[in-house]
Amino acid sequence: MKRTRIVLLLLAAAFGAVIFLNRGRLFSAECIGEHHTLSVNGVTIYYETAGEGDPVILLHGNGGSHKDLHTEIRQLTEAGYRVYAPDSRGQGKSSSAEEYHYADMADDVFCLIQEWKLDKPALYGWSDGGIIGLLTEIRHPGTLGALAISGANVSPDGLEDSFLDPIRFLSPVAGSLTQMIINEPDITKEELASIRIPVLVTAGSDDIVKREHTEMIAASIPDAELMILEGESHGSYIVGSTKMGELIISFLQQKPL
């Protein structure tokens, strides 16, 4: 009986994880700006642009799409920024790949920046988007002008077991994007220390990323600011909320591009 209860609890948690990781396919929102596609690094990336002004790139989390950040897109365009919001490879309306790695996604972003002819844009990344943002600047130093991340981890052991265990439970049948969460990233403190641009590191007090892990990320980056939002979860202050957009705008105003 006890074993059955444990299995049922894992299945329930795994179902919740599946819903979270596939929210971009389950929920939709209208297009805010202009939509485009661009072939880079072996994939076709779908992205939206909106607004005029200094460039800001927004990156969503695993299993989502740019639509998760529509509130932030509106806020940034109204504040006088030009927003670029791509769907990461294999997600949203972008094309799929045979396998998925954060490093490839970071290289996608670098190639997009080159194609867009942007000079040191700011980048905001939520969850996997934050990981991709960190790797973009680590792998291509000097590409970004400023970086803000929310709920990012630099290794799988930075995730709470209550989130990671159900995903591991599903691993035999999980897709490559989910497997990536279990096996990646592997960003060292030395690599974090190599980031020489202003960085805003945020997380919720009830995040799926361990608090001490978030604190370590911020402490390892020379010019990083840490903000833990009390009473917030992994995405409660981001999806459909104006809180993160306000923080991004305040951060960019203090650290002009």
Image (cartoon, rainbow, N blue to C red):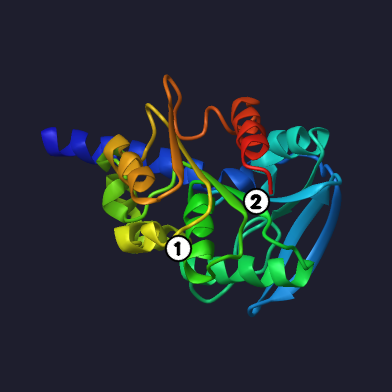
User: What is the x, y in percent for residue 139?
Assistant: 49, 70
Label 1: element kind: loop
- Residue 83 at least partly seen: no
Q: Secondary structure at mark 2?
A: strand
Q: Which mark is residue 214?
A: none
Q: Position of residue 247 (x, y in %)?
A: 60, 31
Give amino acid for label 1: Gly
- The mark found on residue 122 in the picture is 2
Residue appearing at x 71%, y 41% in the figure: 28
Q: Is residue 74 above or below residue 93?
A: above
Is 134 above or below relative to 70? Answer: below
Local crowd at mark 2 within 10 Å, few (<14), some, or many (≥20)?
Answer: many
Query: Would residue 113 appear left or right of 218 to someone viewing this image?
Result: right
Along the viewing direction, whichever of 8 and 176 lies nearer the viewer: 176
List x then y, in percent, for residue 3.
Answer: 14, 39
The residue type indicated by label 2 comes to Ala
Within 10 Å of the Cα at label 1, are there few (<14), some (14-19), or many (20+) other Cα atoms?
few
Labels 1 & 2 near each other (Cβ < 8 A): no
Instruction: List the residue tagged with mark 1.
Output: 175
The mark closer to the camera, 1 or 2, is: 2
Residue shown at 31% from the left, 54% from the top: 156
Q: Is residue 4 left or right of residue 97?
A: left
Tell whether 182 sits left or right of 23.
Answer: left
Q: CA distance from mark 1 to mark 2?
A: 31 Å
Q: Earlier in the sequence, mark 1 or mark 2?
A: 2
* Viewer-nearest residue: 253 or 230: 253
Q: Quadrant of the N terminus?
A: top left
Q: Residue furthest top?
A: 231
